[in-house]
Image (cartoon, rainbow, N blue to C red):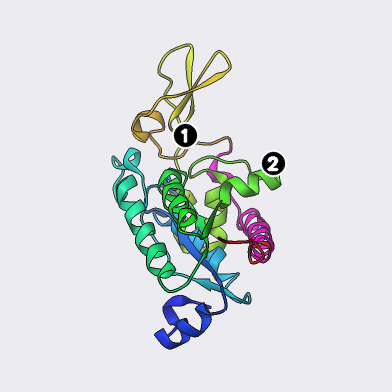
Amino acid sequence: MYLGKMTTAQAKEAFAKDPVIVIPVGSTEQHGAQCALGTDYMVPTYLADHIEDMENVIIAPTVPYGVCPYHLSFHGSINIGYEGLYMVLHGIMDSLMQHGIKRFVVLNGHGGNTPSIDRAALEVYHKGGICASIDWWSLVAQLDDKFRGGHGDILETSAMMAVDPDAVHLELGEPMNPQDPSENVKAAYIQAVDYRGGTVRLVRDTKEIAPSGWFGPFDPKDSTAELGQEALDISVDFIRGFLEEMKEFKCK
């Protein structure tokens, strides 16, 4: 069921059954020259669309903006900041809790959103509810190592080829070309470097680290819709199972 398609009378009836509210959350930000700005919210929306048939599960409208200040040197990236995203999530969940909702799951498409999600989730807990969050890209990598990825690399690009082929343009892709701060300190990820086998957080603008915009172990030029669909299917199966379990969680 989609919350946005319900009338207020239908919502009142559905809320009386103690449903789980699923909130897809992402970001509008660069994913390299080859992949769409909307990747981080389009994938969670796809996942939500494939669980909306579940009994006593309601899909809230997608939040398409998130926290990405380090991508702002790339055209089209939109950052609403930690406080901005927190306020949006707080507003959504606080409003619905006033109508009796106690169970929430955030389907998250962007790692930078985590602090804001956690802050809003803890507030739900202190009000007697429960809020879980699932980072789909991290989840699939845990379930199968072949889905290990980074930002805008083969995993996300493949997923988008399955979600919306028109949103991917492999012919525009560029080499990663990571920029190392020094001879002994190597770029390890967008906000991390490796020194003597250890990882150190070093926050910089993405363009200073990976001028092409993407970063990861596998080049997006090798992306396929088949790989993306497999990752999405595994995610959907996991999420459906977790939601069934969450229906049994005790709330205060």
Q: Residues within 10 Å of mark 1 (few under 14, many from 20)?
A: many
Quadrant holding the C terminus: bottom right
Q: Is residue 145 magenta?
A: no
- SS state under label 2: helix
Q: Which residue is located at x 42 percent, y 14 percent?
A: 182
Task: State the extent of the magenta-drawn residues as a range.
Answer: 218-244
Which percent across, then down, holds residue 245? 68, 62
Give me the disc on residue 88: none
Distance between the alpha carbons at the discs numbered 1 and 2: 21 Å
Q: Are marks 1 and 2 in contact (CB under 8 Å)?
A: no
Horizontal side, residue 127 vs residue 51: left or right = left
**Front in this rendered view, residue 250 or 153:** 250
Query: Which amino acid type is marked by label 2?
Result: Asp
Query: Which amino acid type is marked by label 1?
Result: Met
Q: Residues within 10 Å of mark 2 (few under 14, many from 20)?
A: few
Asked if residue 57 shows in the view, the reply is yes
Q: Quadrant of residue 141?
A: top right
Which percent across, then down, holds residue 116? 40, 48
Kindly report which numbered mark, 1 or 2, lies closer to the viewer in this rendering. 2
The residue indicated by pointer 2 is 145
Q: Is residue 240 above or below residue 28?
A: below
The residue indicated by pointer 1 is 176
- SS state under label 1: loop
Q: Which residue is located at x 34 percent, y 45 percent?
A: 82
